Structures are given as C-alpha cells and as structure tokens.
Image: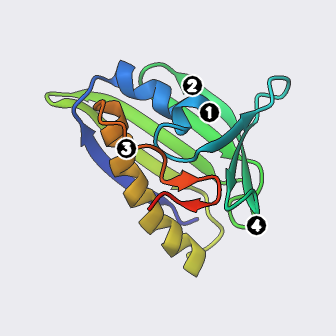
C-alpha cells in the first residue's frame, strides 16, 4: 500500500511538538480551524470547505512525547488510512517523521494530499517554534 512520507527538523523539543500532533486542539494551530471532538467516542472531526469534507480521526497510539497515531474513519480515500507522527530528539530540537499510511493506491488525490502534507509540515514547524502561522484550512477554504 502506498504511503505519503515527510521528515522535518523543528527547532523545539519533542515535548513542545507532541501536543500539536496528538490532539484536536493542537491541529487548530497548524492544520484546520474547524475541529470538533466527540468526548464520548474520542473521535476528532476536521471540517474543510464549509464541512463539505469531514475527516473523523481516532487516536489509536499515543506515547508522549515521541509518538502519535491516528486512524482515519471517514473520507472516500482516507478511510482506514493512518496518520503517524514519530518525534525524536535531535541536536536542533526534534526530528519529525510523518507518514500518511495505507492508501489503497497512488491516485491523483493521493498526489495532491502529498503536496498538501508538505505545506502542513512547515506550518507545524512554525507553530511548534512559536511563530503562530495559524491553520492552513480555515472554515471555508484555504487560509491564503
């Protein structure tokens, strides 16, 4: 199964990066403005483009401050894929290794998502370094 992979060095310790990748609240700092959490099920919903697209994510692995793993529970091509964030201390702070894993095939949407994840990695880096980039996706579209 195809996987999207990225790696980026962040000038902040893993304990500062981990909350940004292990919670819905963290996602609002760099990924999506429209985030809801169902406190009963623990599913975090991210809404895009006026909620015409909604991805439900379940946290299935969380070892602070080195690992967070989410199972995608919705989305035509995202269903049953995983978002895996591995954080390791480096001399400059944190080496983040990211994978959006277990896609069914390398569709055009897969390729588009790879591009988007690249942009998101830089927003995550900026948020962890205290630069306040805001989420890439606002409630109705892209932030730019």
Q: Is residue 144 above or below residue 38?
A: below
Callout 2–callout 4 Cβ contact below 8 Å: no
Q: Is residue 83 above or below residue 48?
A: above
Report the residue marked by disc 3. Answer: 133
For the residue carrying disc 3, how many other residues have a C-alpha within 10 Å: few (<14), some (14-19), or many (20+)? some
Please tell me the numbered disc located at residue 62.
2
Across and down, in percent, residue 131 comes to 29, 36
In this view, the mark in front (4 or 3): 3
Please tell me the numbered disc located at residue 76.
4
Q: Quadrant of residue 62?
A: top right
Closer-to-camera residue (16/87): 16
As measured in the structure, the alpha-carbon distance from the residue carrying label 2 to the one carrying label 4 is 25 Å
The residue that appears at 51% across and 73% down in the rendered structure is 112
The answer to which of marks 4 and 3 sits earlier in the sequence is 4
Across and down, in percent, residue 72 comes to 70, 49
Q: Which quadrant, please, contains the C terminus? A: bottom left
Please tell me the numbered disc located at residue 24.
1
Q: Quadrant of residue 89?
A: top left
Q: Is residue 96 visible?
A: no
Callout 3–callout 2 Cβ contact below 8 Å: no
As measured in the structure, the alpha-carbon distance from the residue carrying label 3 to the one carrying label 1 is 17 Å
In the rendered image, the residue lying farthest to the right is 40
The answer to which of marks 2 and 4 sits earlier in the sequence is 2
Side (left or right) of 118 relative to 63? left
Closer-to-camera residue (74/134): 134
The answer to which of marks 3 and 2 sits earlier in the sequence is 2
């Amino acid at each position: 199964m195809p996987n999207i992979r990225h790696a980026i060095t962040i000038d902040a310790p893993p304990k500062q990066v981990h909350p940004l990748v292990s919670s819905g609240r963290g996602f609002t700092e760099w990924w999506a403005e429209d985030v809801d959490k169902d406190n009963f099920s623990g599913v975090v919903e991210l809404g895009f483009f006026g909620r015409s697209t909604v991805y439900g994510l379940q946290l299935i692995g969380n070892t602070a401050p080195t690992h967070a793993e989410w199972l995608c529970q919705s989305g035509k091509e995202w269903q049953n894929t995983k978002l895996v964030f591995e954080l390791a201390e480096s001399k400059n702070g944190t080496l983040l290794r990211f994978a959006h894993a277990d896609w069914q095939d390398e569709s055009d949407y897969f390729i588009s998502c790879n591009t988007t994840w690249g942009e998101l990695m830089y927003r995550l880096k900026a948020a962890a370094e205290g630069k306040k980039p805001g989420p890439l996706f606002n409630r109705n579209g892209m932030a730019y």
